[in-house]
Amino acid sequence: MTRHPIPAAFAGARTLVTGGTSGLGLALVEALHAQGAQVAFVARDAARIADLARRLPGAHGIAGDVSSQDDTHRIALQAVSALGGLDLLVHNASSLGPVPLRPLADTDCEDLEAALATHLVGPFRLTKALLGALAAAAREGGTHGVRPVVLHVTSDAAVTPYAGWGAYGASKAGLAQLSRIWDAELAAHGVRSIEVDPGDMDTPLHALAVPDADRAALKRPRDAAHEVLAAAAAARFSAAVPFRSDEAPRAAGAHA
Amino acid sequence: MRAADRPMQRPSDARLLAVDAEGRMRDLPRAALASLLRAGDLVVANDAATLPASLGGVHAARGAALEVRLAARRTLAHDDVRAFTAVVFGEGDHRMRTEDRPAPPRLAQGDTLRLGPLEARVARTLGHPRLVELSFRGAPDAVWAGIAAHGRPIQYAHVRDPLALWDVWTAVAARPVAFEPPSAGFVLDWSLLHALADRGVGFATLTHAAGLSSTGDAALDGRLPLDEAYEIPRATVAAIAAAKEHGGRIVAIGTTVVRALEHAASRTHAADAALPSGPGLADLRLGPRTRLRVVDAIVSGTHEPGTSHHALLAAFAPEDVLARADALLERLGYRTHECGDSVWLKAALRGQSARSNLNTATLASRLGQRRTRRPSWMPNASRM
């Protein structure tokens, strides 16, 4: 198993991770905390939030459901209050929907809508609510070449049409494109958006999807977290994008 | 998603009355704002997000219902939850005019108020039956979680439907420290920010804990604005210095930006000293005798005569020009009536200390419904 050095790119940075109490999200919260970041994390289960907050002194646990419109601004309020700003937003929260996985033809509309709410609409809404804080961080960090980053955890199911992964894959594909369009629009304002596929990991979600998987062949969340943070660090220290009017979003119609 | 009409903060037919340093006035579509600015100018906005600062609850000992409206803190710090200045109303909610709200039960130091999941102690009374300092019990994270879960945006009787948090956050909202929206900021959207960048106009922010616009009590309203905490980032101080060095103008989006910048400037002695960055507590009042040291122009929402926000505009223009602008706003239909009260959309100008010939723009939204005391940011209905 590859061992990655812990990047210290986020020491002191103000970071928020959704789905932060299990799987990759938990590994990201632990890694960020270990390198001295200020960490807030969102999860649905109050008991698990309290457990993790106890285990990681100084971390801020926030109860909420990223798929809920009513929760979005409450999450943003608590996170930005606790952190005083925001340098890294990780959209990690993920849900597989009903298991065992079923073909699209047998997927209920409501389950597709739930997948879109968790993987596409929820992250869109949360980024929008936090955009002011991210843009403020960009202006503060501009002179040091440090950029706030919005990181979207995607999946190879967003690219490859795996049978049975319809709702999950389609919603993750939407998330990946959302990330790219955010980046096209926000890079000139100093905010970067990236999408990262962490690969097949030994997580509760994977166990639900593929109960008979050979766990030894799966990536450990801890290793995946270091790869994800390395990608985030690369975006954080990426070169400034000068504002060019011909790249402004309203010009995009010309390419349609 | 809630299906809804267009939020009132961003009506598509909004107007802008631009008043220049000589008092000449032009009626423009709001979208023309960018055209009033030129390369090298710096737009400064207040990026405070708005708290759900209305907390319903009961007086623990007497069981009497009340509504707490958080109104001020000494700092913007997350852990500063022990000393909120608050206005307390008796039974009822926002659908009753504040002027008609009953007084709260008599409040004394040491009283406990139960506000949903929160518990607050009256740390001291502040010389008025409705005004107290509240200290929340519990760890800061739990207090903010309680405010997030239980609080509602402060709103007034003309909008009956409850507002959601997203109704009161501007497009640049960041730290949640304002008690009411820094309403002029609703002029901003990301299309405008693109347009500004396109023209070489700079954009910067500060964070200022905008307080209550009205309490419904004349004695209390006379004490507004309360002292308001703010913070000016280093990057903003640098951007202001750079703009001024090259002859650019500093354009404040809203009265809170003026209050923060001019307060910070008042802390320096030499006229050309650098503006201090970092936290501050604005305790000054701006008015006709104010000599503005930083801000060259203001884009403001509308404010009623007699309010502290309105008084601030007199720092930019003589009263006769403000009165003429008001008359024009009326004639152009910027304002309408209900119950004999007017919504007044105010123009503001450069003061006599003008260093350059400068346009000062005041934003005026056409309001679709009339009522008394409608702050300009109030939406009819909402959508995220």
Image (tube, rainbow, N blue to C red):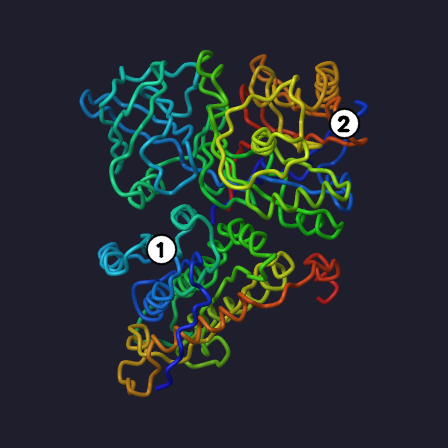
Give the residue number, with chain letter if any, for mark 1: A65
Please state which of residues A110 and B139 is positioned toward the viewer in this rendering.
B139
User: Crowdedness of circle 1 by 10 Å Cα count: few (<14), some, many (20+)?
Assistant: many
Lateral position of residue B126 relative to residue B176, left or right: left
Q: Is residue B124 above or below residue B358?
A: above
Q: Chain of mark 2?
A: B
Q: Is residue A20 above or below residue A3?
A: above
Give me the disc on residue B296.
Answer: none
**Residue B178 at x, y percent in the picture:** 47, 35
Lateral position of residue A231 relative to residue A222, left or right: right
Image point (51%, 36%), residue name? B208
Image point (45%, 36%), residue name? B163
Give the residue number, with chain letter if any, for mark 2: B354
Image point (28%, 77%), residue name? A207
Please state which of residues B156 and B246 is positioned toward the viewer in this rendering.
B246
**Residue B136 at x, y percent in the picture:** 28, 34
Alpha carbons under labels 2 and 1: distance apart: 52 Å
**Residue B1 at x, y percent in the picture:** 47, 50
Q: Residue furthest front?
A: B270
For mark 2, give the secondary structure: loop
